[in-house]
Image (spheres, rainbow, N blue to C red):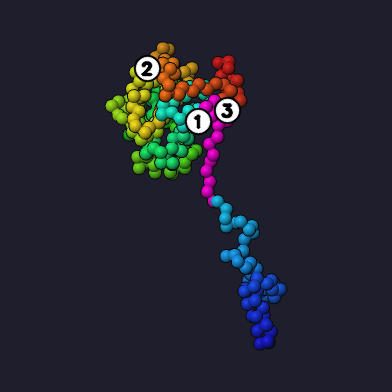
Amino acid sequence: MEALMTKRATAKRQSREFGVLDSHQFIEDSKVRRLPQQSGQGGWSPHPSNDDRDQGYLKTLKPKSDGQAELMTAIDEHNLVMALGPAGTGKTYLAVAKAVEALEAGRVGRIVLSRPAVEAGESIGFLPGDMEDKLAPYLRPLYDALSDRLSMKRVKALMAEGLIEIAPIGYMRGRTLNNAFIVVDEAQNCTYVQLKMLLTRLGWHSTMVVTGDPQQSDLLPGISGLSDISARLEAVPDIAVVRLAEQDIVRHPLVASMIGVL
């Protein structure tokens, strides 16, 4: 009996040292079944390069149309960009995605988001809470774009640190936004005076992207200043005015069809 136990112990020791598969490991009364160790490696792996795989994940930002490619290039090359186009062309998403990209790369110190608090044809009355709570329903599209690029937990943490700031248009007077990426969304609901004030907030080492659809203004006719200002700024060499069209719509195909007839 002792000889059998000694022989089995020797065989197990050899299998551990030299990676030899021992049939005695698979007898019916065995409770531990070892996998063979390969010499020169730290442990067994189902794939030779298993331990060398890159575990990082990053959603790649790619344009889906020529207009979106033009907009992304304009944001990279200009400090002030005006993105005009119909609904569904990705104006807001691309602007916020580029803002997150700049913040993550350390090219800017913060992101400033601004949007006019104008209802789409109906008034919902007074909203409870502080300034951010009151603006939350209007800024929901910006939050959606942010949470798509960052987790909502990360967004809240960055907002708590002041790296992402929600700035109402009414409180932007007198500010100078240095080292920031500013996104002004739904600019078609801003008057000429408001847009002039917003555009002149641009400071050093900052990028501003103004997005809007001149055909979907919730203001009274003739009040929106987006079309007038974009036409004037189009002649300025260092300012990019990108006009997206129906072929750049990336929502449901019916959206493009409706835009053409509405």
**Residue assigned mark 3:** 65
Q: Is residue 154 magenta?
A: no
Residue drawn at x 58%, y 17% is: 260
Kindly identify the amino acid type of the residue bearing the numbered disc 3: Ser
Q: Is residue 226 visible?
A: no
Q: Which residues are magenta?
A: 55-70
Instruction: Considering the whole magenta stretch, tell me its main secondary structure.
Output: loop
Residue 113 locus on image (x, y percent): 39, 32
Within 10 angstroms of label 2, few (less than 14), some, or many (20 or more) residues?
Answer: some
SS class, disc 1? helix
The CA distance from mark 3 to mark 1 is: 11 Å
Q: Does residue 76 appear to the left or right of 249 in the view shown?
A: left
Q: Nearer the viewer, residue 113 or 203?
A: 203
Q: Nearer the viewer, residue 236 or 185?
A: 236
**Residue assigned mark 1:** 72
Mark toward the viewer: 3 or 2: 3
Q: Does residue 21 appear to the left or right of 142 in the view shown?
A: right
Q: Residue 170 falls in which quadrant of the image?
A: top left
Residue 200 locus on image (x, y percent): 34, 24
Mark toward the viewer: 2 or 1: 1
Residue 6 locus on image (x, y percent): 65, 84
Q: Does residue 171 appear to the left or right of 187 in the view shown?
A: left
